[in-house]
Amino acid sequence: MDVAERVRANPASVPHGGTDASLVPAAPADRDERMTLNLFFEERDDRWFPGDRHIRPLLRRMLLGKSWISGQRRVFLNLCAGLDRVGIRYRVNDYGYIRKHPGELACIIGRPFVLDWFAWQNPLLLGVAMYNHPVDAPEHLKDLHKKTILVPCDWYAEMCRPYWPHVEVWPVGIETDVWTETAAEQKSVDVLLYDKVRWEHERYGSELIEPIRRHLEASGRSVEVIRYGHYKEDDYKAALARCRSMVFLCEHESQGIACQQALSSGVPVFAWNRGGPWQDPEYFPDKVRYEGGVSSVPYFDARCGRTFIDANGFVAGWSGFWSQVSAADFAPRDYVMDNLTLEKGALHYYGIAEAVQRQAR
């Protein structure tokens, strides 16, 4: 584990074959009365033999160097960091303990294959890294509709509630002491163009990305481009330190941690927010039709920046956005500090977990 465990866990391999909340929650009760959380996070299942999920990342790191931190792992790491800061104790992957204490809540943050490792007798809090959509849940886990499941934002919760009525919204906190502001006089680039267009990239390259880039350059703005999945966090942090603003291009986000890291860094964002149905091609239009309206910036207000719908909307809105950037009218870090710190994310998670444990008794 890359986090310090506040209660020593036993991460031994487990054999196969077993069967709307406020963004600013109240602090839990007196520290001595707080329950210890039982956290379970696994990014990968065993592939060739029991326990090889622990070995494969080490081999990969030896051969290829430090690996990319996935969104799921970032959620887990930030939750643990927040729990450390507010003094809430937790165990990590202590399967031996949880099997001996079937009345205690198990918080399964990682992938749902953990549910298959043995016959869980415990009350469960699942998510946020479960299934992309409830239709993916296998037949033997159809009773998930009876469990409390976490998703990162309101629009995602609305999409899932017809299948999972006990959905709670929980966004993880951002490391605001890592993603910090850089003084204006140290900025050297006008715009960071963040390309997270995931589907039909060639189409949107010609319809959206290149028109935006050409317009920025024609306006005399210097541009740096970064593409999702092709950088390390340190590269992104350095780019944010250089850039005065960011154009964020993504079809939709369930939370948008990278965008929020930019906001925490004091970088105003002009975001492509096309709205409309959930158009993940693995689901739309044949498997799932959610027409409620998605968002690429589910946590965002006027302090953070502005949004646009398409390339024409970008051209129409750019000068106004840039004028506000130049006048220092935005305050994106204030939004994050008010809503999305590590501490607030941890307290919010604990509050949900405490309520689920209480209902199970």
Image (cartoon, grey):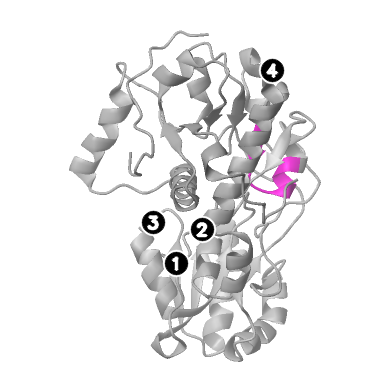
Q: Quadrant of the C terminus?
A: top right
SS under mark 1: loop
Give the residue at mark 3.
Answer: 230
Along the polypeptide, which appears first: circle 4 or circle 1?
Answer: 4
The answer for how far apart the CA atoms under marks 3 and 1 are is 19 Å
Judge whether residue 137 can be spotted in this image: yes
Find residue 340 and report its horizontal and vertical position in percent.
59, 59
Judge whether residue 195 can be spotted in this image: no
Q: Which mark is residue 164?
A: none
The answer for how far apart the CA atoms under marks 3 and 4 are is 38 Å
Marks 1 and 2 close (CB-CB < 8 Å): yes
Give the residue at mark 2.
Answer: 174
SS under mark 2: loop
* Nearer to the camera, 233 or 106: 106
Marks 3 and 1 close (CB-CB < 8 Å): no
What amino acid does circle 1 point to?
Trp
Along the polypeptide, which appears first: circle 2 or circle 3?
Answer: 2
Find residue 124 and report its horizontal and vertical position in percent.
60, 25
The answer for how far apart the CA atoms under marks 1 and 2 are is 8 Å
Q: Which mark is residue 179?
A: 1
Q: Nearer the viewer, mark 3 or mark 1?
A: 1
Give the residue at mark 4.
Answer: 143
Numbered label tally: 4
Find residue 323 and report its horizontal and vertical position in percent.
64, 89
SS under mark 4: helix
Whether residue 307 is situated above or below residue 43 in the rendered picture: below
Along the polypeptide, which appears first: circle 2 or circle 4?
Answer: 4
Along the polypeptide, which appears first: circle 3 or circle 4?
Answer: 4
Residue stretch rendered in magenta on the structure: 148-157
